[in-house]
Image (tube, rainbow, N blue to C red):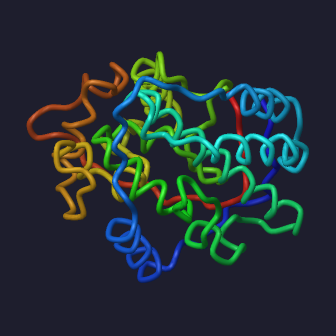
Amino acid sequence: MGSTPVAHPVSASPNVLVAGVSILKSLLGTRPPRPVGSGDADHSLLEKALTDLSQQTAPEIVVPTLMRYIEKTTRLDPDTFSRDAALAFWLNLYNAGTLLVAAEASARDHDSVLRTPGAFTSPAMTVGGERLSLDAIEHGKLRRFGDPRIHTALVCGSVSCPTLRSSPYSGAHVRAELDVQIRHFLSTRGASYDAGRDEIRLSRVFSWYGSDFVRPHRMPTLVPSRRRRVLDSLVPWLPDQITAVIGNPAPRIRYLPYDWGLRCTVG
């Protein structure tokens, strides 16, 4: 397992107004994905980068490989892929772009990706003639696939974000891979139960995107959902020790603070 070490939690958080504007801009200004073919992409360069990262402590080591991967991959047209292959394409491209952001932050000795101006909102790559930021890929492309499990597959180069898979997502197996990923996230840092306080604690990821789990057919959803409805929507993937204590009434549900301290972990 490789990671960039963090001395202490970082309490900084994205500017809410800037984040909201970026989401709306992504939804209004990004073409929806329309995969209608049967093609797929080669993600072997990303697999090499992930293998190298798992053996190193600094993300800068994989920058040349990531650059080659992004240059090669962005020449492709994901709308000529199958739906699953296109979903894997955008997941991998987003995560590769985030690793570059994390590498830049590490090289500048920043303690968080948030110290890099425009890390997620500035144009980062061009696909099919469309200049895209990481936010545009997440909100304008990925959320439109209608699969909320993506929120446990996307990384942000931070302590509280999901762990990177040790291999890229694949068009042939992306649905099963996402199922494994959400279960892993929920069983590690995504959900826990404090018996002393009778409290279920959820990652703040589910505060931000819980409505996508409650109403996946309407993704991307922007209207917040009640905590109990979010928790109920996660039941298919929650560990048994948490589902066992969900009753009526349920324990108190609390969203945890999000630690934006710099870290890239492969596991």
Q: Is residue 16 left or right of residue 111?
A: left
Residue farthest toward the bottom in the current orientation of the protein: 17
The answer to whether 106 is drawn above or below residue 15 in the figure is above
Quarter of the image holding residue 238? top left
Q: Which residue sits at x=75%, y=54%?
A: 100
Q: Which residue sits at x=82%, y=35%?
A: 53
Which of the pair 226/132 is nearer the observer? 132
Which of the pair 82/258 is nearer the observer? 82
Q: Position of residue 67 (x, y in %)?
A: 79, 48
Q: Which residue sits at x=48%, y=40%?
A: 78
Q: Is residue 240 left or right of residue 4?
A: left
Q: Position of residue 224 (x, y in %)?
A: 21, 62
Quadrant of the frame with the C terminus: top right
The answer to whether 33 is drawn above or below residue 2 in the figure is below
The answer to whether 83 is drawn above or below residue 96 in the figure is above
Q: Position of residue 189 (x, y in %)?
A: 52, 39
Which of the pair 237/42 is nearer the observer? 42
Quarter of the image holding residue 232? top left
Which of the pair 79/110 is nearer the observer? 79
Q: Is residue 218 left or right of residue 35?
A: left
Q: Position of residue 203 (x, y in %)?
A: 43, 48
Quadrant of the frame with the N terminus: top right
